[in-house]
Structures are given as C-alpha cells and as structure tokens.
Amino acid sequence: MESTRTLKDKIFLVLKGLGMGAANKVPGVSGGVVAFVAGFYEEFIYSLKKINGKAFKLLINGRYKSFFNYINGRFLGLLFLGMVISYFSVSKLLDYLIIHYELYVWSVFFGMIIGSIYYINKDFRDWNYKTYTSLAIGVIIGLSISFLNPATENNNLWFVFFCGIISVSGMTLPGFSGSFILILLGNYVLLLVDSVNALSDTFFDIIKGDFSFINNSERIRMLKVLAVFTLGSVTGLVTFSHILSYILKRFKSITLSAIIGFIVGSLGVVWPWKKTIYKLSANGEFLFDSTGEKIVENYNRYFPTWSAETGYAILFILLGIAIVLALEIYGQKTRRTHA
C-alpha cells in the first residue's frame, strides 16, 4: 500500500510539473499559481534554495547521493520532468487551442485565476494596514504590467540571459507571467517558439542520424540563444528562490498579500474578451514567426454583449474555477493522508 501511494505521489508530482510548464508557456498565466494552489509552492521555493554553496561542495566532492538528498532531488527532478514533457507536448496543444478557441481558453484561465484568488485568500486572516497596502501595490503592479506595450525583438546574448532571469518570475512569483514578460521584452517568439523549434528539429535530426545542422549557422545561432536563455533561467530560479525564501520567513503575511495582489492584477492580462493586435511591417503587412503564425503585439480589451458565445465563455470560466477547487480538494486529501 505504501509503495503504491508513493508511486501515485510521484505520478501526481509529474502531473503538477506538466501544469506548471503549460501555465508558464501561456502569456498571462503564472506557473507559480499552479504551485500555490496545488499546495507545493513553499516546498518548491525552499528546495530551490538548497541549491547553494554547500550543494556544489557535495557535488564537487563526488557525494552525489548526499547532494541529491540535500537539494530534495526527487521532488525537483519529478517536477522538472513534468515541465520538460509539457514544453514539448501540452504546451503545443495549448498553442493549437489558443489559435482555434482563443476566447474559451482565456475563459478557463480567467476562471482558474479567480479560483486561485479564493483559494489563497480563504485561509489568510492577517489583514491590517500593512497587508492591505501590500495587496494594493501588488494589484497596481499586476494591472500596470498587463497594459504595457511590447518592445522589439533583441537577440543580443546578454539581453537573452537577462530575459532568462526575468522569465522565471512566473514560476517563483505567483501572478507574474514569465511568458507575458517576454512579450513585453519583445523576445517571446525568439525564446519560446523559434529556439524551442530549433531544439526539436535538432533532436529529430540526431535521431535520424542527420548531422548536417552543424553547418546550419541559423540553427546553431538559435541553439546558442536557447542555451544562454536556459542558463539565465536557472540563474534566476536559484536567485529568486533565495530571496523569496528569506522574505517568506520574515515577512510572510506581507508577501502573501502582495502575491494575492499580483494574481488579482493578472486578471487584466487573461481577460477573455479582447481583440488581438498583430505586429505589422512598415508597409502594413502582417509579420509572421518561424511557424507561420502571426506575431502578437498586444490586445484591446472590451466588455462583451450577451450572445451564445458569451454564455459558453462564462461556462468555461466556471470550469476554470471548478478545476482549482478540485485541486484544492485533492490537496486536502493528500495532506490528510500524509498527516
């Protein structure tokens, strides 16, 4: 029975990683919210914090088992396995759904964020002028980010490294969408579409025994961009985790109220009723990414009139809320089982 439960926990941890990975890919949605609602946010932050000088000493000295146990390797490994699988599977499905059923996809995420606000807020009791101020600042920052205009693409490797550091904010800071930040920085298509496609193509070429990509300067450039972006992401992940771990220990109520504010503010990004503004060339023609899709520049938000489509969208919002409530029920059962 114990081994079965352990296997079940491992499977669910991979699935949670799938959820985080999918959420991180969608502009406006934060993988950190998934971690928060699924009940493993603090363990995630504190596990990342363990990647420090002591961990590297254990690794350099060849004490691999001690290193693995010290950084909570099984937890992080299964979680990141889910994220990697998601990157090349679930996120592809989401890309398709957003293209063909955009309103309903945004409606589900809008509902999930509403459910997340309820979930986080229902057990938070430490409301005072400090936490209300923190909440207000979080809302203002979240809303302000959602209405900024994107920059133009920049493939300078130092800037790509910086993008990597910033993009992981969505994993460590619920309510901050790393992918939306990349849109604002102008590098969403470069880093989450073009470079990932280059890596996928390279994997398939290697499997087929075709190594001609070595002479493809554009492919090599994109792989370099992805490598630098990944390095920046790892750097940001470890750095943010240390900062957040410190803040959570000393200013937990203020931090949680700010996170609630960020999540409330992010509703502006995922508002379902919006018209997509596409990037245009100097002569007014649509610009396309390497997959042939139009490049999104920003969104015009509006309030809907009643129609069958609006009714379906509201149902999908309710579905999003139900998904979060189901995750909460699962989390409660898991905590009781391990109590």
Image (tube, rainbow, N blue to C red):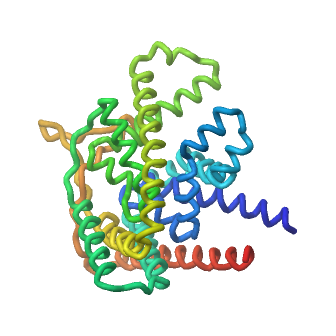
Quarter of the image for residue 254 reads: bottom left
> In this view, which residue lies farthest toward the left?
283
Q: Of residues 253 and 301, which is closer to you in this image?
A: 253
Seen in the picture, residue 292 relative to 242 is either above or below; the reply is above
Residue 31 location (% of width, % of height): 47, 59
Q: Residue at x 53, y 34 (%)?
A: 200
Residue 288 location (% of width, % of height): 30, 38
Seen in the picture, residue 223 relative to 196 is either above or below; the reply is above
Left or right of 141 on screen, residue 98: right
- Can you say which quadrant of the picture contains the N terminus? bottom right
Quarter of the image for residue 186 reads: top left
Q: Residue at x 67, y 44 (%)?
A: 67
Q: Residue at x 59, y 49 (%)?
A: 80
Q: Of residues 312 and 42, which is closer to you in this image?
A: 42
**How many numbered circles does the render carry?**
0
- Can you say which quadrant of the picture contains the C terminus? bottom right
Residue 29 location (% of width, % of height): 41, 61
Left or right of 298 on screen, residue 44: right
Seen in the picture, residue 58 relative to 307 is either above or below; the reply is above
Q: Does residue 12 show up?
A: yes
> In this view, which residue lies farthest toward the right?
1
Seen in the picture, residue 262 relative to 76 is either above or below; the reply is below
Quarter of the image for residue 164 reads: top left
Residue 114 location (% of width, % of height): 41, 76
Q: Residue at x 59, y 38 (%)?
A: 56
Q: Of residues 334 and 99, which is closer to you in this image?
A: 334
Q: Does residue 89 show up?
A: no
